[in-house]
Image: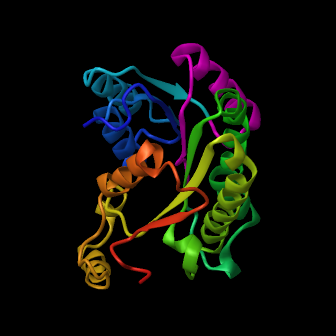
Amino acid sequence: MKLLENKTAIITGASRGIGMGIAKIFAAHGANVAFTYASSEAPALALEEELTQLGVKAKAYKSDASKFEQAEALVTAVVADFGTIDILINNAGVTKDNLLMRMSEEDFDAVMEINLKSVFNMTKATQRTFLKQRSGSIINMSSVVGVKGNAGQSNYAASKAGMIGFTKSIALELGSRNIRCNAIAPGFIETEMTEKLDEKTVQSWRDGIPLKRGGSPEDVANACVFLASDLSAYVTGQVLNVDGGMLT
């Protein structure tokens, strides 16, 4: 059963990792997919081709969600190309980890701009379309680090915690118009970024998780399908931990 048939989704930062996983699962569920990338053009165009072969409309856009004007221009372009937007997934994000004593102001600001300001930019830009059609589902990609904090990641944790506060506020603001806003807090998800880490370290992380494994981008994508589809029609303002029980 295709749960997202004829729905159109915007996914930011989808040329790799979790974003790419979401794009593929959404297309498999019948969604048309507009997605952004920052610099990796070749993987983005390859993904566009792969999604199109699943029988849906897909298009890659080079756009920086942390820039207000670019977010506005992106949404205008997507509405022109696809006719509508039903789902927004704010997934674009970066880490610039360091202990506070060594963290530069630039590294703090960059993480807040890309991770948190982008959510404001994109939500504000899509809000007009959602309000006009009196429906929409916004999904913000937070993190377990935003829920519990983590040494050496004060900038990242602050941005992801801010995202949760923003999510709950937007759910309250837009609920009366049938626009839902939820957050997902992934735990340890194994992507091409984690492949570069020492296997022993990674295994010790897996051992500390109740389900005894790292998550996959598909695990996060399946949670997104639930929150994007009519299955969750009465769910808003929530944070769904997809962490194998890490925060239990």
Position of 102 relative to 128 (above/below): below
- Image colouring: rainbow
Image quarter (top left, top right, bottom left or bottom right) of the C terminus = bottom left
Residue, x 66% and y 21% (percent of image)?
76
Q: Position of residue 6 (x, y in %)?
A: 41, 25
Tell me if residue 213 can be seen: yes
Left or right: residue 220 versus residue 55 is right
- Res 21 → quadrant: top left
| Residue 29 covered by magenta stretch | no
Image quarter (top left, top right, bottom left or bottom right) of the N terminus = top left
Position of 107 relative to 122 (above/below): below
Position of 113 relative to 245 (above/below): above
- Res 98 → quadrant: bottom right
Tell me if residue 152 can be seen: no
Q: Position of residue 158 (x, y in %)?
A: 67, 69
* Residue situated in front as seen by the camera: 109 or 26: 26
Left or right: residue 16 versus residue 71 is left
Q: Position of residue 34 (x, y in %)?
A: 48, 28
Q: Position of residue 110 (x, y in %)?
A: 68, 55
* Residue situated in front as seen by the camera: 21 or 39: 21
Position of 62 relative to 88 (above/below): above
In this rendering, the count of numbered labels is 0
* Residue situated in front as seen by the camera: 234 or 60: 234
Residue, x 41% and y 69% (percent of image)?
187
Give the magenta range: 64-93
- Res 134 → quadrant: top right
| Residue 66 covered by magenta stretch | yes
Left or right: residue 5 versus residue 71 is left
Residue, x 73% and y 39% (percent of image)?
124
